[in-house]
Amino acid sequence: MKTSKIKPISLKQITFALSLIFAITINFNAKAQDNFIVVLDAGHGGKDPGKNHKKYFEKDIALKIVLLVGKKLKSNDNIKVVYTRDKDVFVELKERGKIANQANANLFISIHCNAHNTQAAGSETFVLGLHANKQNFEVAKQENSVIFLEDNYQEKYEGFDPNSPEAVIGLTLMQEEFLDESLLLASSIQSNFANDLKRTDRGVKQAGFVVLHQTYMPSVLIETGFITNKNEGAYLNSVNGQEKVANAIYDAIIDYKKHLDENTVVEVKPKPIVVESKDRIYTGVDFKVQIASGSKKLELKSYNFKGLKGVERIKAGKHYKYYYGNSSNYDEILDVQKAAKQTGYKSAFIVAFKGDEKISVSDLLKSSQNN
């Protein structure tokens, strides 16, 4: 890795450089924050009531929760909210994904209610993936069945059959890239439901939902609870219950955004006295840019990574992580991250390793600033 020689510079050059860096840092952070877009999707609507039980209708409960989450998110100046629907209208599954993609969203969150012929209860949050068991497939099949209400659905979805397990398998490839981020958000949502609301935790699961397949960003589908359960149905249909569920989802989104900011945005604070200009080089540390992750083992060919060459694959548990670039120079890896994002990996973030151990990038940078 080439490094430039340290050259003495004048006080005038130092002052100009610091002012430029400070201005760029402020603008970069502001832009990163302002561009955080959350698409909220209220399941079903209009001629599609979703699940219903007595006086409880999934389409109404989902919409009320979505609007509450949106209202809370809008209180943050740095977050933009986009709704796939904000009233009782029918929106096709493909259109929901299109709305998210055209908004260039950072997150897609679809909110639903569950139902069963027993007194089953509890919340569960899904990410797109191969159905782990028959039960997960049945949940996905119920939500996907809405496509039968759409005109020309066979043409729109290229012959996809929501009743076919084999067809569901083909949905998962596009979302592989965002699996880690989707799982992170889903886990946070479920944790809030279980710990803060004391709801029965049915876990984070993977299943083949068409609405998630249509999006190209971290995406989750939340089954907030069972409207067929006597107590849970009443809870979800109540103002108090909807408010608490919305709070739990909102908190999870904020926690997710905070995690993302800590891994991708580093605030540069210039020191009062600078005597030389040099790159931020950390001996013994390898900075890399994570561009993708998922359960699929991809060949390390450039055509699998939007033309990027030299991608590294590391297995972590049952999943694979894909890294681009490797440098002990933090300023160089920032350029690598920028290049990855320009290529299309908009969620690319910087990670750091000391040997085989993954370490915190933010802690590393803070420690060097304090030295």
Image (cartoon, rainbow, N blue to C red):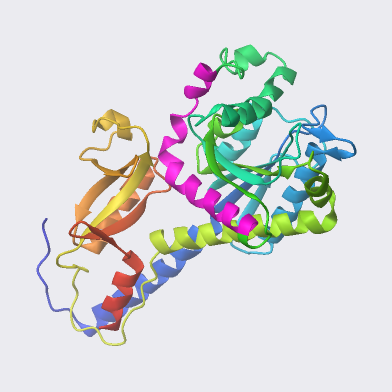
Q: Is residue 355 magenta?
A: no
Q: Which stretch is magenta?
A: 165-194
Residue 250 x %, y %: 64, 58
Viewer-proximal residue, 35 or 201?
Answer: 201
Viewer-proximal residue, 127 or 193?
Answer: 193
Residue 6 x %, y %: 11, 73
Viewer-proximal residue, 297 or 6?
Answer: 297
| Residue 209 makes an appearance in the image | no
Residue 154 x %, y %: 63, 12
**Residue that extends furthest to the front in the rendered view of this protein:** 118
Q: Is residue 249 above or below residue 102?
A: below
Q: Residue at x 61, y 29 (%)?
A: 140
**Residue that extends furthest to the right in the rendered view of this protein:** 55
Q: Residue at x 56, y 26 (%)?
A: 134
Task: Answer left or right for 3 relative to 210.
Answer: left
Q: Is residue 334 above or below residue 232?
A: below
Q: Residue at x 77, y 58 (%)?
A: 243
